[in-house]
Amino acid sequence: MAHNGSSDRNVEHPYNPTKSKDTIQIFVPVNDEIYKERFDYELLDAEPIRLGLRKGFRITCIPFITYGINKGDVVLADSKGHIKSLLRDDGQYGYRISYPDFSDEEKAHVHVDRVLGQVREAGFEVEAFNHKLSAVNAVNRQEAIKAEILLADLVSQGQIVDFDSVRK
């Protein structure tokens, strides 16, 4: 699929554990004030699905820097792969988490791995972008409440700097 903007202006999901041979990338304009200066699109992994006569795409990754689209949602895209609309909200909740700065990159990676291990042990799916930003997925509102409690605890312990929901 073709796209606008150079690849260094796009955020991809290279470590998406649910990627399959049928996965394509949907181009979602970055709408976050912090990131839109640096990035044009977040490329969300998606699988094609049929919706009657229309062809939709189910998002298979946890968004890092775009709001309003979550894992499991079904979207409509144009022939170039640019999102046109949200067709069905799957009810999942995505969170992005940011980490303290480390002068040593190796220590930063060890710290992120340890934090994400705690989040996984609590039953949540995670996707790491780098040693500064990760994403957490909760499958429904009840699980989202548990995720928010866990993430707030990690903030109070100084393990993460902050978190916010991409479900806006």
Image: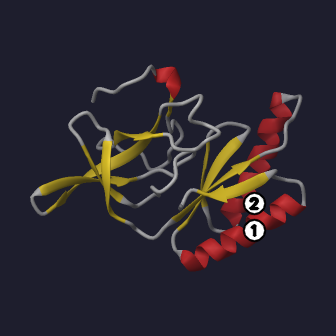
Reply above or below: 45 against 145.
Answer: above
Secondary element type, mark 1? helix
Left or right? Give the position of 67 relative to 150: left
**Picture coordinates of residue 142 (x, y %)?**
58, 80
Residue marked by disc 2: 118
At label 2, which amino acid type do we have?
Gln
Reply above or below: 10 against 159.
Answer: above
Q: Which residue is drawn at 51% across and 25% down?
A: 9
Quadrant into which the N terminus falls: top left
**Picture coordinates of residue 97 (x, y %)?**
70, 51
**Picture coordinates of residue 39 (x, y %)?**
54, 30
Q: How many labels does the image show?
A: 2
In depth, the one of 48 and 163 nearer the eye is 163
Question: For residue 91, what is the image quadrant?
Answer: bottom left
At label 1, which amino acid type do we have?
Leu
Circle 1 Cα neighbour tier, 10 Å, few/some/many (<14 / 14–19 / ≥20): some
Secondary element type, mark 2? helix
Q: Real-space Cα distance between discs 1 and 2?
A: 9 Å
Q: Residue at x 75, y 68 (%)?
A: 150
Question: For residue 72, what is the image quadrant?
Answer: bottom left
Q: Residue 140 carries which label?
A: none
Residue marked by disc 1: 150
- Tell which circle, 1 or 2, labels the residue nearer the N-terminal end: 2
Reply above or below: 166 against 128.
Answer: below
Left or right? Give the position of 151 relative to 127: right
Question: For residue 15, what is the image quadrant?
Answer: top right
Asked whether disc 1 touches disc 2, contact meaning CB atoms under 8 Å apart, the reply is yes
Left or right? Give the position of 4 relative to 159: left
Q: Residue at x 56, y 35 (%)?
A: 36
